[in-house]
Amino acid sequence: MDTITGGVTIIMNLTDLLKSVEIDSIRYNQLKTALDKIDIKKIAYHSKEVNSDTLFVCIKGHQTDGHNYAKHAASQGATVIIVEQFIEDMDVIQLKVSDSREALAVLSSNFFDHPSKSMSIFGVTATNGKTTITYMTEEIFKAYQLKSGLIGTILVKIDKEIEMSRLTTPESYDLQQHFAKMRDREITHVSIEVSSSALELKRVYNTDFDVVAFMNISPEHIRLHESFDAYFNAKASLIRNASKTSTVILNLDEPLLIPLREETEAQVVTFGIENKSGTITVSDIQFLSGIPSFTVDILKPFNTLSGKRIETTSFDLEMSVPGYHSIYNTLTALVTGLVNDIPIEDVQRGIKNFRGVERRFQILYDKEFKVIDDLLLNQNNIDSCMETISHLDYNELHLVHAIRGSNGPAHSTEIAESLTEWFHKMNVTKIILTTASSHVDKKDEVTEEELAAFLKVMKQNKIEVTFFKELEDTLRFGVKQLNVGDILLISGAHSMDQGARKTLELLKEIHPKVDYERIDQVLENKLIGMDSFKVAGKTLNFSSRM
């Protein structure tokens, strides 16, 4: 199958495709075919995707090496193969490069005719908050009636069409193909989550970013990198490599990010709540049922992407999602909107319209009692969630938590210690726990050591534990504990992805007087944890979601 975008089959001469790709050396096939005599109809980095007239790129992953599949790719019809070391006994043209991932990114951009140059691209990196920030920015784009796209952890959205994501940031070929589809659908503005792995593995290399943001960093994801310094430098590369014509957004309340102001050629716009020395700060923060409102103070002028000057001013901002940490997410989205020449009143309306993201302090039900869904993946996530709950009015907090597997006993201990620290502050004396055995892949199963480490911390802190092996039994017990004025918090990683659906169904069964219409509305808009064939038929309505 040839690659088709915009209804047009792509056929590209190899010499054009190779522009800006640094070739170290070439090993020709027996026919000594000249490169300018070869046409390419497809690029692939998985051998199973190869057919005739395909250029196959051998990339090295954490577990597999594409070089091991080169001969299979050749047998499937690949006519050219990009390698980092030549492969013997193969009569196919081989082009040797020093970095095949970088080559794949350049080739992909060339193949789809540099689609990221046709749109305003916003990329954000952070340990926490990337998904929320991109969704909030999407609401601002919608408020200004822009045709927009979104690429991230949960989904890829092209105007009103969606598909579920496999990676936070897609591989470079898939990313450029998404951009190409967006360009062909006349999308003008795109928000993308940029993970540290994506930066290290060159997935966003050769992408023309217009606005980039670095919001926060903590050591939760360093297991994917050699060290914390490597993790930081991967994220910082998004800022350091920003072009002169782009804008960088930095959070000055994160001390590690402050030096990056001097390490980029881009225009830098900074903000802080505690650190008020930047471009923007806030004042008069108020909380109503945990939801912030505040005044935005622009202290220093900055330019939009079109060259318009935004002068010093102040204006009020109301939000619809709770939490002190949400102010940081809001300021990032706000600056992105302003830099994209969106008027302040439309930015205000977009932020007010934003109702949250699935599984990120998502309020599933808020009537006679509250049901909240959050990940609680790391200390920052726990701090943000619990701090937000502390601003709410409630009688008793019931926590159902699915332990995260495959991260080791030390991680279980850290999560348990973070939780118990908050339990003591909030007078919580018990937790409902599960390993959700039937709802995790083999690789994510909770080991006996991980469970024991978590339970040990609970015992040391005199927290009563009610444990169930299966998710539904755990949720049923949690829902039964609910009384008027209580909060039920369900939390955990992938093992809790189906928790919201099951919990809402149990609410109907166990508390028959609940608001069925409200529950059905939430279920109708859910994507995570739903059957794939149902998800495929949905059109996402961001503004109606909580």
Image (cartoon, rainbow, N blue to C red):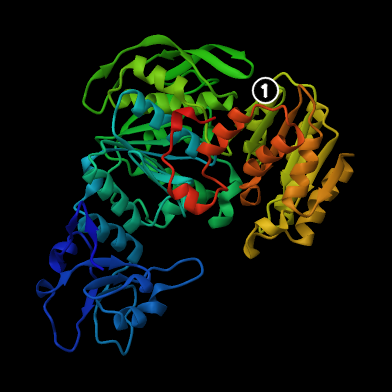
Residue 205 in sight from this viewpoint: no
Nearest the camera: 121 or 438?
438
Nearest the camera: 228 or 414?
414
| Residue 91 shown left or right of residue 361 in the figure | left
Q: Residues within 10 Å of mark 1 (few under 14, many from 20)?
A: few
Corner quadrant of residue 27? bottom left
Q: Is 45 drawn above or below residue 463 in the view shown? A: below
Q: Position of residue 47 (x, y in %)?
A: 36, 74
Residue named by callout 1 = 367
Corner quadrant of residue 517? top right
Q: Residue at x 66, y 59 (%)?
A: 406
Q: Quadrant of the C terminus?
A: top right
Q: Residue at x 30, y 22 (%)?
A: 342
Residue 66 in sight from this viewpoint: yes
Q: Position of residue 292 (x, y in %)?
A: 56, 17
Q: Position of residue 171 (x, y in %)?
A: 38, 57
| Residue 457 shown left or right of residue 402 in the figure | right
Q: Position of residue 443 (x, y in %)?
A: 63, 63
Amino acid type indicated by mark 1: Lys
Corner quadrant of residue 314? top left
Q: Quadrant of the N terminus?
A: bottom left
| Residue 65 shown left or right of residue 25 in the figure | right
Classify mark 1: helix, strand or loop.
loop
- Number of callouts: 1
